[in-house]
Amino acid sequence: MSFEERLTSLAIKIRQQKAAILTEEATKNAFVMPFIQSVLGYDVFNPLEVIPEFISDVGTKKGEKIDYAIMKDGEIQILIEAKKVGEPLNINHASQLFRYFHVTTARISILTNGQVYRFYTDLDAPNKMDEKPFLEFDFLDMDDHAIPELQKLTKSAFDVESVLNAAGELKYVGQIKRVMASQLNEPDDDFVRFFASRVYDGMLTQKVREQFSQLTVKAAAQFLNDQINDRLKSAMSKPSTTPVVVAEVQNDGPDAQTDTEKEDKKDKVVTTTEELEGYNIVKAIVRTEIDVKRVTPRDTLSYFGILADDNNRKPLARLHFNRSQKYLGTFDADKNETRNPIESLDDIFEYSDILRQTAQIYSDD
């Protein structure tokens, strides 16, 4: 399995089992140890690589334990402190990491609840763990930009200098992204004033600020949606390497569509954020059976299609989201579609086996 496939496999496990995990110890056994073993590549049963409940007495704190210390070349490289899945992570949970970071050779420390992983180093002051992480990774909301950085921490590719060199940029880019997300959802007065002052010539009274607060949120949502649609249309407009014969194109009868009618129909297609999220879930599921680069979207007026090789003859799934009752369309070996009613995007994971079986049909193409 590739690195991304191992991440996806653990993400699916977390999503399916999260509700059944009730304790910190269960979280470590179900999620954290597989992360160390499968994702990072360290043998959790080899004390020369992974030391559970690591003890290094610090000042008056005798016998205090860190959940895991990861060794490489005979030295401690990474410290991990785990909390129960679902428990919010904050800096107060990291007191032991702060103390152990100072007295060991570790340059990387991790605070996790099994789903979210926060990575720290000592950018602000040498040999003193920063209060803010340089990288955060959520298995249920994976950031493609974070995956290459996470891979640098694996046993086979571990390069602490490379990680530290990138840490500064990662830290501030991550913080800026979180500030932007916060402002786009709930803009503060300064953010609203910044935009309002550039498009409104009158006085920014309280009433005007309240009005522009709503307008800013609306404009931001539309801007982001336009960006997504532009990228998606660009991806879908690329010519397919495989000839595609679509039934409606073959229609030469009196009801055949003209090129203008086809273009008008295409212009009416609106790709929603929910459809893109559903597409990403399906892509994450089938990537264990088929190269993710072969999984392509094809939006239409009636459904959002997910294809292999951008080929209508190779359907992987269809998202019927343009109605009050949503359906996930799955396909059998004869390419017959079954519409499965779903209530939420999470329900797509219940059809993981069927989706993988469909992807296997095209895996050797």
Image (cartoon, rainbow, N blue to C red):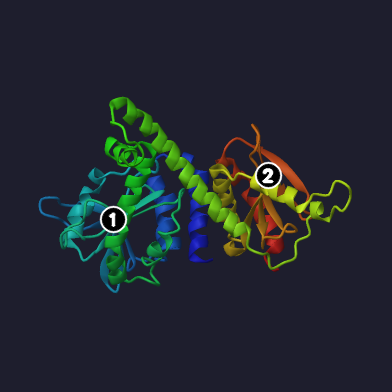
Q: Residue furthest right?
A: 253
Q: Quadrant of the C terminus?
A: bottom right
Residue 134 appearing in the image: no
The amino acid type of the residue labelled 2 equals: Tyr
Residue 357 spot, x, y in % from top left:
68, 56
**Residue identifier under label 2:** 303
For the question of whether residue 27 can be seen, the reply is yes
For the residue labelled by badge 1, is the local secondary structure a helix, a strand or a loop?
A: helix
Q: Residue at x 72, y 67 (%)?
A: 242
Where's residue 356, x and y in %? 65, 55
Mark toward the start of the polypeptide (2 vs 1) = 1
Residue 291 image-quadrant placement: bottom right
Determine whether 33 is above or below 164 in the image: above
Q: Amino acid at mark 1?
A: Tyr
Mark on residue 24?
none
Name the residue beneath numbered marker 1: 172
Position in image of residue 240 (x %, y %): 68, 64
242 sits left or right of 114 in the view = right
In this orientation, which residue lies closer to the viewer: 247 or 344?
247
| Residue 26 position within the rendered picture, expressed as x and y whole percent measured from the top left | 41, 46
- The one nearer the camera, 89 or 56, is 89
Q: Given the current orientation, which residue lies at the most extreme left position?
A: 60
In the picture provided, is 281 more to the left or to the right than 69? right
